[in-house]
Image: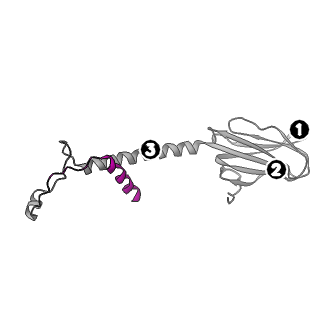
Amino acid sequence: MLFADLLVVIYSSFLPAPSSEPQIERSAAARAVAPRTLPTTSGSGFGWRHRRNILVMRFSLFLLALFAVGLVALASACDIIVHVKSDTDKKFSAQVLAPNGKKSDKWNYSHKKERNTFQQKASECGLKDWEISTFENGKLNSTVKVSLNGIGRVTYLVGDNLIPTMKDRQGAICNGQCAPLSPK
């Protein structure tokens, strides 16, 4: 209700003041027979309150449309950061494939706790799956597919079995084998 009141105040400042016609006090019988009309500022027959309400509705619809466009733009935006981290001493390689076809370099890992990062900012996120692949001695060992959308980051750990497993995620919308959202 406060938002609507704020809109009324804003629009009231742009509207002309109501006419200063003299106010005539009418008896109860006269009010019952002919209801009181609002003073008008032009010959249109509509009072200033009616025009104010129309302006408030138009402004509200404009704000709603603006909000909807912003929401659609935000929902289709994509800024995903994918971390791939080694949790093994085995030698292997890993590569990330984004939905738009862009690939990371093929990263080589030889120790625990090694980590590489791939970031993709795209407008066509959510159309296809992300793929995180691991390779052993140059041969494909495992590929994990997951749908990621929105703005956020995910971390994949690669253990002794060389299968990438999502360990955590923040902010990214995920479908498939996903880790729960981490607290900020």
Amino acid identity at mark 1: Gly
All told, the count of numbered labels is 3
| Mark 2 burial class by Cα count in 10 Å: few <14, some 14-19, many 20+ | many
Image-quadrant location for residue 26: bottom left
The residue located at (39%, 48%) in the rendering is 60
- For mark 1, what is the residue? 138
Mark 2 falls on what kind of element?
strand
Q: Residues within 10 Å of mark 3 (few under 14, many from 20)?
A: few
Q: Residue at x 35, y 53 (%)?
A: 9
Residue 97 falls in which quadrant of the image?
top right
Looking at the image, tell me whether mark 2 or mark 1 is earlier in sequence order: 2
Kind of residue sitting beneath label 3? Ala
Amino acid type, callout 2: Lys
Q: For the N terminus, which image quadrant?
A: bottom left
Q: Which residue is mark 2?
A: 85
Residue 67 x %, y %: 48, 46
Report the residue marked by disc 3: 65
Asked if the stretch drawn in magenta spans residue 87, the answer is: no
Q: Badge 1: few (under 14), some or many (20 or more) residues near its Cα, within 10 Å? A: few
The nearer-to-camera label among 2 and 1 is: 2
Range of residues picked out in magenta: 1-21
Q: Earlier in the sequence, mark 3 or mark 1?
A: 3
Assign a secondary structure to mark 1. Answer: loop
Give how far apart the Cα atoms at labels 2 and 1 are: 18 Å
Mainly helix, strand or loop, the magenta region?
Answer: helix
- In the displayed structure image, the side of residue 11 where residue 120 appears, left or right: right
